[in-house]
Image (cartoon, rainbow, N blue to C red):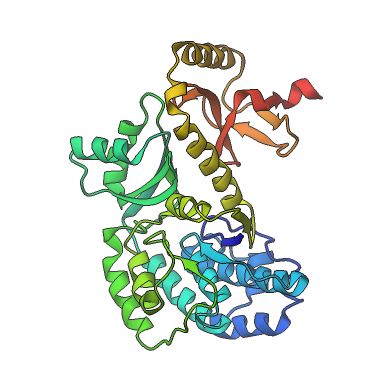
Amino acid sequence: MRTYVFPGQGAQQKGMGSSLFDEFSDLTRSADSILGYSIKDLCLEDPDRLLDQTQYTQPAMYVVNALSYYRKLRETGLVPDFVAGHSLGEYNALLAAEVFDFETGLRMVRKRGELMGRASGGGMAAVLNASEAEIRTILAENGLDSVDLANFNTPSQIVISGRAEDIETARPLFQTGNHLFVPLRTSGAFHSRYMESARVEFDGFLSGISFSKPRIPVVSNVTARVYEDHLVKESLTKQMVNAVRWSDTVEHLLGYSGMEFEEVGHGTVLTKLLKKILRELANERKAPLRTAPKSTENAVETVRRWNERYTVGTRFRSTSGNYGNLETATAATVLFGHRAAVYMQGYRGYFDLQELEPVAAAQ
């Protein structure tokens, strides 16, 4: 079985979709007409540096994801067994399932991007190497019940969302021990209670739109289960104020025998998250074995020697050859009580120390 997954905001990059716009010229012209600007120029040249602004990012990602899917259908003729998308990417999953057409989806995404782009005074941050229970406990014990959990990207990579001042207050609470705190560049508290006014307005906008029954099962961000046909509108509005349950989505799909995943659209953000989810789920199943004192002691010693030898900012390559331009963003640490690892800038994830070799030493 196969699931196509579509990335959302954060995967955008100047130059994305370079070979798609001319191939699907009719849809590109249609997008330009709806948006009032050239989607090709925005994605390829970004002359006014708008691509990272929410109201432009979301239509751009939607169009590139959509054209990527249409190309895949044209080249392979294969329709997936399931589809899912991370936040904005869910609109592409619904498009692939023929719940609405390309133009209708783009109009919804444009409105969604405008509403989310208006949000101000909010902030978001990724908390790494902490479970949901740990994060909720730390927030509650420090009087930060005003902070919501917004994205469950992997079992140990969770995004928090709330007022900017509350996110800043939370920072030192997650910079102790093995936890890491990575602020995200957003002006709004997305996927939280603070998007309620945007949700209400978006709900009104969707009232005039008709949705068809999905032709492919679509897994919802809100429930991490397959959409119920009559709840598409409700799920899309709820998504604005509820967490993206991506890790649960992947785990649910893994319950189907022989499930394989393929990312459709620009970049490999979801492919990397999938690898982390699989690794962390496997580690959870081995938890009783991980607590052996010798294993922990070995990891601690490995991390100590590593940090004595390499400073933050050192460049590495993967020994498997898959990644050749990595740079450490933090000191090495011990994850899950046994794993010696370091967080990499650009890759935005952890690598085992044994999977890395310094670039300078290899030249």
Q: Position of residue 47 (x, y in %)?
A: 64, 65
Q: Measuring 27% from the left and 60% from the top, which residue is drawn there?
A: 194
Left or right relative to 303: residue 223 = left
Question: Residue drawn 51% across and 78% down?
Answer: 105
The residue positioned 58% from the left and 51% from the top of the image is: 269
Q: Is residue 63 left or right of residue 168?
A: right
- Name the residue at the right extreme: 363
Give residue 155's quadrant in the image. top left
* Residue 192, percent from left and from top: 31, 57
Q: Is residue 296 above or below residue 174?
A: above
304 sits left or right of 19 in the view = left
Above or below, 129 relative to 353: below
Residue 337 shows in the view: no
Q: Nearer the viewer, residue 151 or 33?
A: 151
In this picture, residue 265 sits left or right of residue 245: right
- Report which quarter residue 128 is drawn in: top left
Q: Determine which quarter of the picture holds residue 187.
A: bottom left
In this orientation, which residue lies closer to the viewer: 141 or 298?
298
